[in-house]
Amino acid sequence: MTADDSFGRLDDDDYPAYTMGRAAALLGTTQGFLRALGDARLITPLRSEGGHRRYSRYQLRIAARARELVDQGTPIEAACRIVILEDQLEEAQRINAEYQRTAVRHGTAT
């Protein structure tokens, strides 16, 4: 991979660019909180060749939402479930909107 390829990946929401320490600092939380999210299977960080956790921007957004819920008093397990359901709903709405656009283009919208 060239340097130009590496810089291009920084725009990729799924590229694991953040170490655990940096991710925790950005979120204003602890590394233990990120580990708990991993234990709850809300986010699964990729691992560097040395075995260190690496987080993507997408994962940080998910973790930030979970932290928001926990800060409001929601137990972490419930917060993780809520975030998963919110993410699934957003994806279903995106798919539905795409189907609607396709139907309009093909004149089959009802």
Image (cartoon, rainbow, N blue to C red):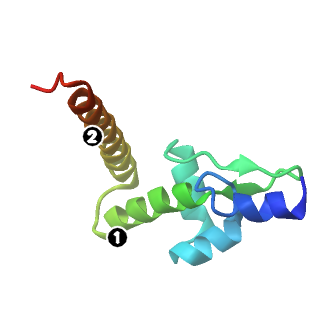
Residue 31 lies in what quarter of the image? bottom right
| Label 1 neighbour load within 10 Å: few <14, some 14-19, many 20+ | few
Circle 1 sits in a helix, a strand or a loop, which is it? helix
Image coordinates for residue 45, horizontal then vertical, percent: 65, 49
Circle 2 sits in a helix, a strand or a loop, which is it? helix
Q: Residue at x 46, y 56 (%)?
A: 62
Tell me if 79 is positioned left or right of 48 in this view: left
Residue type pointed to by label 2: Gln
Residue 66 lies in what quarter of the image? bottom left
Give me the C-alpha separation between circle 2 and circle 1: 27 Å
**Disc marking residue 93:** 2
Q: Residue at x 29, y 59 (%)?
A: 74
- Disc with the residue nearer the chain's start (2 vs 1): 1
Question: In this rendering, which labeled residue sits more in front, label 2 or label 1?
Answer: 2
Q: Residue at x 49, y 46 (%)?
A: 42
**Disc marking residue 71:** 1
Image coordinates for residue 109, horizontal then vertical, percent: 15, 27
Return the residue nearer the eye: 53 or 10.
Answer: 10
Residue type pointed to by label 1: Asp
Image coordinates for residue 1, horizontal then vertical, percent: 89, 52
- Answer above or below: position of 78 versus 33: above
